[in-house]
Amino acid sequence: MCGRYATTRSEADLEDLFEAVSVAEQTAPSWNVAPTDPVPVIRVSATHEARVVDRARWGLVPPWAKDLRTGARMINARAETVATSRAFAPSFARRRCLVPADGWFEWVERKPHYMTPADGSVLAFAGIWTTWGPDAVLTCSVLTTAAVGGLARIHDRMPLILPASRWPTWLAGGGDPAELLTPLSPAELEAIEIRPVRPEVGNVRNNGPHLLEPPASPEVTPATLF
């Protein structure tokens, strides 16, 4: 699963990277995003007839849910079932988004590791969104898929990452699920670096760039996937 990640780019950077306009209050940079936190998402707005940088609560809350607490259990949607799931299928068909990230965290034997592009480029996780309640609270989930290559040594799941060439199709709605949900190949993931980071990231109350520093006595050295 993807249960913790970092997203620190400014609103101006996201507008430029995704050719979008901002329509919501800027989301503060976070080096330790946790479930139910507010996060930036890029979606297509019918009102603005353009891509927009919006703000969503991480953890999709279906319209039929009784309250927002449901979202804490729905931060991820499996690519294998998203098109047929009662909770996720309507959003997958019509309300898809991109979730910008610097990288994501997984734990191996209780030790946190950070997966991030070695060149510092942005990651775009495949996401879905919906609104809930009379206040139309925007909520979202990140799609996950089976891990491949060296990432499978860390966890059996990984976020579904979309290259820029696939952003227009993903955001358009409709389309062939098999093509939309195709994961990147191991070769396409060669630039992802896996490195141990400070254990403080395990506490959701901790935040800041220091969390991405190596642990005081690293037992694992940084490495690329291959």
Image (tube, rainbow, N blue to C red):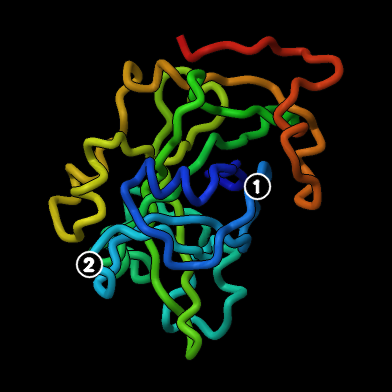
Q: Is residue 196 left or right of residue 1?
A: right
The dot on residue 153 is none
Between 30 and 18, which is closer to the camera in this rendering? Answer: 18
Q: Specify the amino acid type for callout 2.
A: Glu
- Residue at 45% x, 9% y: name it: 226
Mark 1, Cα crowd under 10 Å, few <14 / some 14-19 / many 20+, is: many
Mark 2, Cα crowd under 10 Å, few <14 / some 14-19 / many 20+, is: few
- Residue at 41% x, 44% y: name it: 125
User: Disc 1 marks which residue?
Assistant: 30
Between 187 and 41, which is closer to the camera in this rendering? Answer: 41
Q: CA distance from mark 2 to mark 1?
A: 29 Å
Hey, which residue is sitting farthest bottom in the picture? 134
- Residue at 44% x, 56% y: name it: 41
Q: Is residue 159 above or below residue 132?
A: above
Q: Is residue 25 above or below residue 135?
A: above
Mark 2 and mark 1 lie on one chain; the one further toward the N terminus is 1
Q: Is residue 102 left or right of residue 52?
A: right
Q: Quarter-wise, where is residue 208 in the image?
A: top right
User: Disc 2 marks which residue?
Assistant: 49
Where is residue 103 shown, x and y percent of the image? Answer: 54, 34
Q: Nearer the viewer, mark 2 or mark 1?
A: 2
- Residue at 37% x, 58% y: name it: 21
Where is residue 214 shown, x and y percent of the image? Answer: 75, 20
User: In what element is the residue under mark 2?
Assistant: loop
User: In what element is the residue under mark 1?
Assistant: strand
Where is residue 221 shown, x and y percent of the image? Answer: 68, 10
Q: Quarter-wise, where is residue 82 in the image?
A: bottom left
Q: Is residue 130 above or below residue 21?
A: below
Q: Specify the amino acid type for callout 1.
A: Ser
